[in-house]
Amino acid sequence: MHTISVQKNWDVIIIGGGIIGLSTAWALARQGLQVALFEKGTVGAEQSSRNWGWIRSLRRDLAELPMALRVNETWSKLQEQVNVGYRKTGLAYFASSEQEMASHEKWLAAARQIGVKGELLGRAAAEDLVGGTKQPLAGALYSAEDGVAEPQMVPGIVAKLAAFAGVKIVENCAVRGLDVAGGKVVGVWTEQGRFGAAAVVCAGGIWSRLFCGNFGINLPQLKVAATAFETTPIGNGPQVALNGGEYTCRPHCSGGYVISKLNASIVEIVPDSFKLFWKFFPAWRAESKLLKLRFGKKFFEELAVPTKFSMEQVSPFEKNRVYDAIPTERTISQAMDSVRLAFPQFAQTKIARQWGGLIDVTPDALPIISGVGSTPGLFIATGFSGHGFGIGFAAGDMMAGIIFDKSNRNRREEDAFSFDRFDLG
Ligand SMILES: Cc1cc2nc3c(=O)[nH]c(=O)nc-3n(C[C@H](O)[C@H](O)[C@H](O)COP(=O)(O)OP(=O)(O)OC[C@H]3O[C@@H](n4cnc5c(N)ncnc54)[C@H](O)[C@@H]3O)c2cc1C
């Protein structure tokens, strides 16, 4: 095997080249730290390039809102520097009933206290916003501040910016595990040998639970499968990003639309589903109408993956360089039908490309951005539960601040994302 030339000791090593690992690495390098990032496949090839590209404050958990508000400035500045497809398109949640309007109103009252500049639109204003629709509406929740960027463009560009700031990015090199001495993390073992570091960040997306579990760290994380597609260009679709209740639909910079079906995410039943049953049960009960359970070959695939492995063996991470989830055809045709009912101008659009993605979720659907008390030197930035693309830069800044132990940290804000919030007994 050809050996990479990477210096052997670093201030911080990052595991995973998705938006979260890249943003953390970039933030640390801008502060002058020596940072290396190891990616088992290609940067951004898992969740970070497969998402819808929404950058939203609307309907976020209140705990994430400060990050969602701060991050808009980063996106704007980035777009001034280099094209990542960022546009403040505005974003709307259609409401089909007065009950839904009341729910949006309640959320907005609380979100406004934090600084969200959303508004409630009546039926006529909601229809105007999208240039007319056949969908029966009660109104909409709308924010002109929210927008979209193109996930296929973003990770590669952030990787270049991070490399320019000094981050050493090593692709096709899995981190097999931690090097722990005297109870403290002192580096990592990769498929290309050992590298020392004063701090290690696990930003491994759907792989983080497996990675941490090998060291006795019980990270509560499951996976949800989702499907999305992009249409061929059409000239007269809605210009805002839209949650239509049954579907989502947002303009792509190609002139087409990125569309998905809502309430069609699939929770694969896997061995971890049983191990984490009680931790996820309240979330599953609350969201049971939105999620579909599936028992199939994924159960046996995961059963065959060892949960304990040595640093000398080929690890499960290098056996699967890029997890390529299969999109569901039925979901695609249902989503396309819903969009065509709402917007007949989509009648002739074709599907330009389609893809699947696995989303990493935690029991409270909030990320972990935190040190690990039991394992000094280890930090975790994972579990973004389907919301991590938009706030990725702010999450990277937060993770970097925690590693630096900056005096001006907002510990109250960070508490919601601490690893210790879970009862890991
Ligand atoms: C279909 C879909 C739609 C979504 N829509 C949105 C949206 O509109 N807006 C939004 O904000 N978010 C959205 N998300 C969520 C968002 O994409 C994720 O929250 C975000 O990309 C997570 O980034 P990450 O860096 O944590 O994970 P990932 O992008 O998955 O990156 C993790 C990386 O770690 C690498 N890795 C793992 N283990 C190792 C190891 N041991 N050694 C080396 N490398 C390793 C993996 O190969 C991977 O590249 C969506 C997700 C999906 C799938």
Image: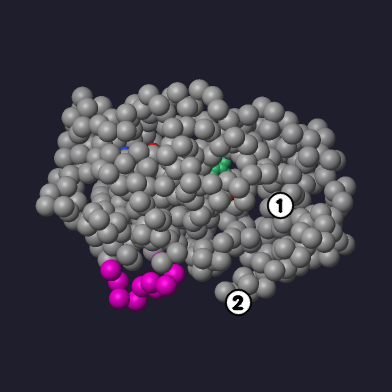
Q: In which quarter of the image is residue 375?
A: bottom left
81 relative to 380 in the view: left or right:
right
Residue sitting at x 35%, y 51%: 425
Give coordinates of residue 10: x percent, y percent. Answer: 19, 52
- Image location of residue 88, percent across then percent down: 63, 60
Kind of residue indicated by mark 1? Leu
Amino acid type of disc 2? Answer: Gln
Whether 318 is drawn above or below 200: the answer is above
Q: In this view, does 372 lie to the left or right of 225?
A: left
Tell me the magenta residue range.
405-414
Q: Mark 2 points at which residue?
A: 113
What's the residue at 84%, 55% (across, down)?
Answer: 137
Q: Which of 383 and 174 is in front in this view?
A: 383
Question: Tag 2's secondary structure?
Answer: helix
**Residue at the image position 72 percent from the left and 56 percent from the top:** 93
Asked whether 341 falls inside the magenta stretch, the response is no
The residue pinned by badge 1 equals 242
Q: Is the magenta stretch mostly helix, strand or loop?
A: loop
Instruction: Say whether residue 407 is magenta.
Output: yes
200 left or right of 144 in image: left
Residue at mark 1 to residue at mark 2: CA–CA distance: 24 Å
Give the image location of residue 357, x and y in percent.
53, 37
Q: In which quarter of the image is residue 413?
A: bottom left
Q: Would you call the spot at circle 2 few (<14 residues within 10 Å), some (14-19), or many (20 or more)?
A: few
